[in-house]
Image (tube, coloured by chain):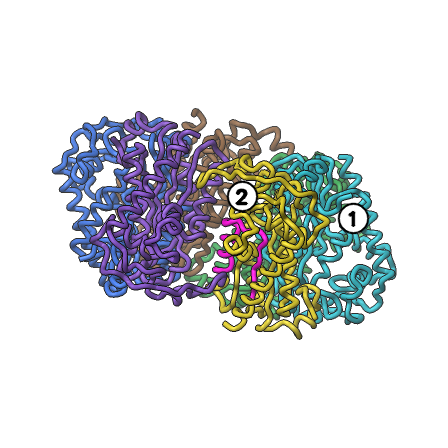
Chain colours: A yellow, B cyan, C green, D brown, E purple, F blue
Amino acid sequence: MFMYLDELSMKEFKENVNENTVVILPIGAIEGHGSHLPLCTDSIQPEYVAEKVAQQTKALIAPPIRYGFCSSTRNLAGTITISFDTLRSLVYDILSEFLRNGIKNIVVLSGHAGRVHMAALRLAAEKVVRENKVNIMVLSDYDIAYDLLDSDESIPNDDSHSGLIETSRVMAIRGDLVKGKGTAGKDRPPKFMVLPDPEKYFPSGVMGDPRDASKEKGNEINDFIINELVKLIEDMRER
Amino acid sequence: MFMYLDELSMKEFKENVNENTVVILPIGAIEGHGSHLPLCTDSIQPEYVAEKVAQQTKALIAPPIRYGFCSSTRNLAGTITISFDTLRSLVYDILSEFLRNGIKNIVVLSGHAGRVHMAALRLAAEKVVRENKVNIMVLSDYDIAYDLLDSDESIPNDDSHSGLIETSRVMAIRGDLVKGKGTAGKDRPPKFMVLPDPEKYFPSGVMGDPRDASKEKGNEINDFIINELVKLIEDMRER
Amino acid sequence: MFMYLDELSMKEFKENVNENTVVILPIGAIEGHGSHLPLCTDSIQPEYVAEKVAQQTKALIAPPIRYGFCSSTRNLAGTITISFDTLRSLVYDILSEFLRNGIKNIVVLSGHAGRVHMAALRLAAEKVVRENKVNIMVLSDYDIAYDLLDSDESIPNDDSHSGLIETSRVMAIRGDLVKGKGTAGKDRPPKFMVLPDPEKYFPSGVMGDPRDASKEKGNEINDFIINELVKLIEDMRER
Amino acid sequence: MFMYLDELSMKEFKENVNENTVVILPIGAIEGHGSHLPLCTDSIQPEYVAEKVAQQTKALIAPPIRYGFCSSTRNLAGTITISFDTLRSLVYDILSEFLRNGIKNIVVLSGHAGRVHMAALRLAAEKVVRENKVNIMVLSDYDIAYDLLDSDESIPNDDSHSGLIETSRVMAIRGDLVKGKGTAGKDRPPKFMVLPDPEKYFPSGVMGDPRDASKEKGNEINDFIINELVKLIEDMRER
Amino acid sequence: MFMYLDELSMKEFKENVNENTVVILPIGAIEGHGSHLPLCTDSIQPEYVAEKVAQQTKALIAPPIRYGFCSSTRNLAGTITISFDTLRSLVYDILSEFLRNGIKNIVVLSGHAGRVHMAALRLAAEKVVRENKVNIMVLSDYDIAYDLLDSDESIPNDDSHSGLIETSRVMAIRGDLVKGKGTAGKDRPPKFMVLPDPEKYFPSGVMGDPRDASKEKGNEINDFIINELVKLIEDMRER
Amino acid sequence: MFMYLDELSMKEFKENVNENTVVILPIGAIEGHGSHLPLCTDSIQPEYVAEKVAQQTKALIAPPIRYGFCSSTRNLAGTITISFDTLRSLVYDILSEFLRNGIKNIVVLSGHAGRVHMAALRLAAEKVVRENKVNIMVLSDYDIAYDLLDSDESIPNDDSHSGLIETSRVMAIRGDLVKGKGTAGKDRPPKFMVLPDPEKYFPSGVMGDPRDASKEKGNEINDFIINELVKLIEDMRER
């Protein structure tokens, strides 16, 4: 019936939100994803997944955050990153407020999967969990998607940022925003080095080879993620 | 041609964004607005205004922030407030990143007009302005709308939160989210007192009388705001 | 009997301070107020009001803070501003300590009325109020004085910083610090713009026309403020 | 001619304040000082010294801060302490603003001599000094007064908080605020222990024996401090 | 000749430390590692590696930090964790000071490999790298060791905390601190859930099966790590 | 039996650590100490004392922190200082974690005795003490050693940084790290001045005259400190 948390009125909120309610908080980024994918690539993926999952689980979707923490892609044209501390505080504040409003089952679903970005989300959730009794799950939809790297032979092992998976998924979600096939980016920044300019190892904004991407592949991957997440939410509800 | 900043690809960003570009950052809130208006009332108004203004000024719209700082309405059902410091940091980070990407004309447009909330936005902007050469305008669309309190006799002088103006505007923007006529809320918290429970003076979530609100009135007010803001942006561009 | 909180000894404090005690915390600023008014203009006004109100209400006056947050006047000669965060922490710490010492009725009275400055005071008070049971009132004496803009025809509508009201009040309080009649400042910074140099629109440090100011007018305004504040304190005591 | 910095107008400030100007910032505390001395004991001493020194050196006095950091006396009735971080930020902000206004010679003169309180002042000054070219001196007038412990046989070696020196000085400065002779407090908290209730070792608020204090002794000590400080300022000016 | 940075005198430091110097900063943790391994398990491994690597590369070793950020093991007996912010600030301060002293090649080598812990180290390094020209490498020796999970069939795929690798390594480094063979811990906390008590899924403090661990295996793994790290440092020096 | 806290396993920790356990946290610095003493001078002294005291009192020693806050010696070659806030947070976190693990008797023993450095340690301890019931002692071994300045005529009154006491102690602890006799440094920075370059008054890194230092003297002083600290710990245990 309802899908978006903030479309409810005060009365509807009081009548419909209770300790069984699951709320999904989609988090994205504004990040350079090559010349074939839009800056909102990491935002539209979890927002799409959230909608499909909400339909199946009757979860509510909180207003998405399209601002994330980008590190190695920071200098690509169009990347708008917020600081680690801001991201952590933002997510902490929102999770705390969910709790103050009686919400006890929360999924923080990030389209951006950077390790430090994810650490901000986890730290926020850990603080809330230590202060309150609540179920919180923190994941990137890419934590699920990358399981396919081993099982799906059509996906190159080194597929990553703006690669085959990501391009296919965006083709399936917002095909109008995909401009051409993209170019392959085979280099990577040297391991373990912390660099001011890591983008010089992938100036195209691509890590992987998106040229065989397709809408069909995208639908397949999206469905895989949606199904997995539905199961995870069902498990969480039973805790 | 483009309206949403993050729908651009890296290439499109490089080709289309320059120091003449105007970017609008809409900021809303998730806030109890009575039983007739949705929690997203303060979000959908500036997002609507931003779209109309962007059409006329060729501005780009950055991903809206639907999380704001709510003080007197904090305890109303469904209000999700972030802290002052988080809001300030979030806006500061985003404005700084606009600049790092070469954007020099920015409008921070808030649908929520709380004084402390607006102070957070101004502080963020002041810090950026002191560090860089850039045009930043910070306002609530209610800063413009409330000019009508004096000039438009059909609007009660004490119209405020969830009142005639706000209800009319939402009727014009997302009529499907308006549930009934609302109830009048005539009391106010005592002046100057800082209270833990100011909402007990307006438990309905309404300050004012929304019962004569109409879609037509809403269109009229929205147009007034849009026109004024277009003029302000033109002035800013000439600075 | 006692007027200044910190002139009490430990013994006198224990015998005289209890949960009925009202404490007034005057807050000022060091801010350019034209060439006819002293930098302490915003400090001496609330300190004077506090003394008169304390006589009538038996309130105690805490040591005044003459450091505030100045934004648009920051670049005027002699302005010494502290940061928003420092001001907020300072007031929060002091209010918390009043409570730790058993004080339950507090008036934060600011001579400086800048919106962001006032937001710092309100945020400090809101935090205390949320953590404790206590009555706190936060206001500027100009919140009261500006009620006269509508009711008193002898005061120009656009009277503001260093204008007729302020000059008259200082003439009544510390006439020896007023040097001449001042000059009229009719311009204002453009609305909503956040500028690094707003003072270029009022280089004289005056917004308004102080030339008709008089000691008599000042006494009249001061009395009006004092009476209103006495009433507000009586109301607070009964809460 | 001028003594108090904030009594100047903008014009007077521009004409009289330059890089040779010395500004004294007096810092005090609101701290239990036994039943014979007022809570403002640590404030009125440096304010008195500052006035006398300003007369001799033509220094300007900035508005005093009567809020300091109290540790072992925190639980004495009437003690109002601000946090270490607030004190440090406050002093840092003010020193920075002095510099922004062209002031290059500053004396931070504290009446409270607690080690951690003094560390806050020093940290603030060190940060400013590292960022700018400026002369800053940070001291307590007790750093000077305690030199007398060795040289003046009339003062007991263990004289300390509210003892003979302090009582004598307050008798000389504000005799009307001294109530009786005070009582001797011979115990001390155990060395090196960090306690939640150190005051239980000196519940009277006195460390030392004030019973032989006199106004004459106070004048003598005050003069000694004033003379020493005048010399220190002269040395600083020549740097 | 020298191995430990802080065993140098000022003179030796000036003569021997220059922009070619490599400094290794070992970081560990105090963390429950089952009943067979000591709390310092994550500290002694990188300290041992650092010594061997320093011998081969003439690097200097900075004083190790034995305090890290532990999340899922926090509630195990004996775990002493510092906060994320403290760890980040500590590493940032130290890296900044290395730079202030002219050091331009730094290896941050952590024995603890928790994702959030590593994010703190990376954030610290990123900030330094953005402000200065310097080579910084941030890694856990387990980033290298876990490469063996694929290539070495004698190591179980799910080997982790206190498992075969870790137990073998400690046997080789400080065999006297290993008490018995340990017990196998096969469960894991549920994926993506943020829990207040994750240790209930591995109350023994072991994730993996240490029972086939041996000193010989440990020497083999340690040598593998040492050789890889020597190569990485040589690559870094040539950048 | 055990001496180092982090050499225990989880099982040993549970069996041996209880509310009677005393834990010593040694804190040092990396600080220029002339050309005859190593940078770790302030670290090895409290670590040595801690070992000897632990033997006599069955205390456990937590992993030492060799990073402290250095102010006047900051610009000497090799000094690595962390910020005041980092040091305070680090010690606060560790003390809090000791408590979370049931430890109730803690000695924070610093080899560095700088006033601001010690203030950081005290502030950390005060915060813990205010939140919990626990015995914490904070001291520098130099707080004890400097008692000898009055009683021991063989030590010059102005002995200080890198002087006779310190040199003798390091000769007794790690004679291999002492290079020659050192040079006398008789100057001192001017009193009360906060300087960016205080080291220009003691460019050799020595304040005092170390030339008559001896291993025998060092043993004598170390024994004095050890005996005093053992007594202090016994007193603490009885509280």
Instruction: Answer with left or right where residue F57 lies relative to residue B112.
Output: left
Instruction: Answer with left or right where residue F108 lies relative to residue D23.
Output: left
Residue F119: x and y in percent read 36, 47
Question: Over which residues does the magenta segment extend?
Answer: A106-126
**Which amino acid type is shown beneath numbered disc 1?**
Ile
The total number of labels drawn is 2
Please tell me the numbered disc located at residue C155: 1
In the image, is residue F15 above or below residue D9?
below
Please give the name of the residue rendered at 57% of the width and 55% of the height, measured from the top-left corner: A110
**Quarter location, residue A219:** bottom right
Instruction: Answer with left or right where residue C188 lies relative to residue F26.
Output: right
The C terminus of chain B lies in quadrant: top right
Residue neighbourhood size for the residue with mark 1, other residues' Cα within 10 Å, grouped as few (<14), some (14–19), many (≥20): many
**Which amino acid type is shown beneath numbered disc 2?**
Ser
Residue B167: x and y in percent read 79, 63
The residue carrying mark 2 is: A71
User: Which residue is more in the foreground, C237 or F92?
Assistant: F92
Regarding mark 1 in the picture, which secondary structure is present there? loop
Q: CA distance from mark 2 to mark 1?
A: 57 Å
In the image, is residue A211 above or below residue B49?
above
